[in-house]
Amino acid sequence: MSAVEGCVDAPAGASRPWARGTSAVLAALAVLVIARMAFHALFLPAYEGPDEPHHLGRIVAFAEGPFLAALAGVPLDGSIARAVELRPCGPGRRPCPAFGTAPGAFNLLRPLPKQAAPAAAPNPENHQPPLYYLVAGLLLRVLTRLDPTGWLGTPDVRLLWGRLLSVGLVALALVLPLRVLFRTRSSSVAAAGLLLLLLPGASEALARCSNDAAVFCWSAFLLLAMDRRAPLWRICVLLACGPLIKLTALPIAIYAVASLWRRTHRSGALLGAASACLVFLVQASRGWLWGGTYEFNRALSGIHESLTRAAQGLSRSLYTFIKTIFWLGGWSFFRAPVALVIAWFLLILGFLAAVRLRPVASRAPHAAGAAAAVLGCVVFFIVNRRFYGEWGGVGGWYVWDWAPWILLAFDDLGSLSALARRILLPATALFAAVANAVYFQMAIRLYG
């Protein structure tokens, strides 16, 4: 029996600490997850993470420019645009040298000096809520001033710093709130979650320069605060912060508000909802109606196709979304082999088929959060179609923002039989190992 198979659950409804051997196995898995993400941050070619130049540009705006201008949204720093042009890239990001003309893998370890800036370009990430960029930018401003060499002023070094900051946020979530939250919960669910975090898609989502790791970390702290019935003021502060990082925090915020309501804290739930809605006042003051990836207050083209074709397109978007959870392929979008995609869907179906629902008193809070997540995805699919003119362009990396909540919901609402654990946990470990081996084989061949 493997160490992962040996993770023993408490009976449904029980609450007891893990055995010492189980804790050691899960600690080792957590270290492996952090190491895998740190390696990805170093391995991935410069600016190959989706939207990394734009996220970095937003951070730099707060690190270097006037605060009010950065808050309102400024064009992408020209030195970042120039750095992107100088680094090899895939066909979707021309003009820049093609992969193979220069080494791509680990090239951030060979940073280029800051180059003369071309004309500034619009930054689409200006549409995002500002909190993560504000905090990261102020931190970068302090570190830059403490660096007498000017090394931290180059775009490449700042990009690597942004990636490692994301890895640090994931590590913080694993070491503190998630370790405490799952200390008396299912060790099998904890093991499955850590094994899934080893997938290439998890690193692609959370080890890049973006605000996604911040949502992951925030959700872990909010869930722990809810579980420990923290003071209402603390929960409200967390509820205000999450959507101000990214709107993908809203489903988890809705779960938290519904949980407060179920606990008969009606006034507390209303105060929590008002805290979570603070993002809309902030975004309105910045001139954006919603403030997601797209400007929802701009005119978009209509969907001029039949209902049948629209339904097919929506299904394609859903399929692409689920498929790219475990493998995105960077900004070059190199695809996973079909056999791996099939195995991924079979693994998901295996967990769904094996779970045994528990007779919990109320599933309403998780159901409310799930309904918000599904509705948000559908709206995003449709807006993406109207914005770009085609279906299937939404990647599944957003799911990793919700990973702590998804694991908590799985543990709250269901359990796995001993037989299911003996099959699914080794299958997940095997799938993660194979997916990583194939991913790096293809990535090295592409990146050079």
Image (cartoon, rainbow, N blue to C red):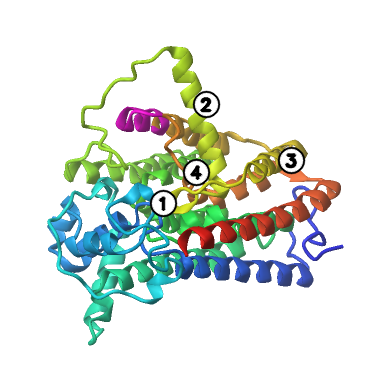
Q: Which mark is residue 350?
A: 3
Q: Amino acid at mark 3?
A: Gly
In three-dimensional space, the C-alpha distance between marks 2 and 4, rounded to whole angstroms, equals 14 Å
In three-dimensional space, the C-alpha distance between marks 4 and 1, rounded to whole angstroms, equals 13 Å
Q: Residue at x 33, y 75 (%)?
A: 111
Q: Which is closer to the viewer, label 1 or label 2?
A: 1
Residue position for label 1: 331
Q: Amino acid at mark 2?
A: Ser
Secondary element type, mark 1: helix
Q: Which is closer to the viewer, label 1 or label 3?
A: 1
Q: Point out the tag, 1 or 3, that comes first from the N-terminus.
A: 1
Q: Which mark is residue 396?
A: 4
For the residues bearing labels 2 and 3, Cβ distance under 8 angstroms: no
Q: Amino acid at mark 1?
A: Trp
Toward the viewer: 16 or 416?
Answer: 416
Q: Point out the tag, 3 or 4, that comes first from the N-terminus.
A: 3
Q: Residue at x 38, y 29 (%)?
A: 390
In three-dimensional space, the C-alpha distance between marks 2 and 3, rounded to whole angstroms, equals 21 Å
- Indicate whether residue 389 is drawn in magenta: yes
Q: Point out the tag, 2 or 3, that comes first from the N-terminus.
A: 2
What range is drawn magenta here? 380-390
* 118 in relation to 32, above or below: above
For the residues bearing labels 4 and 1, Cβ distance under 8 angstroms: no
Q: Main secondary structure of the magenta part?
A: helix
Q: Point out the tag, 4 or 1, that comes first from the N-terminus.
A: 1
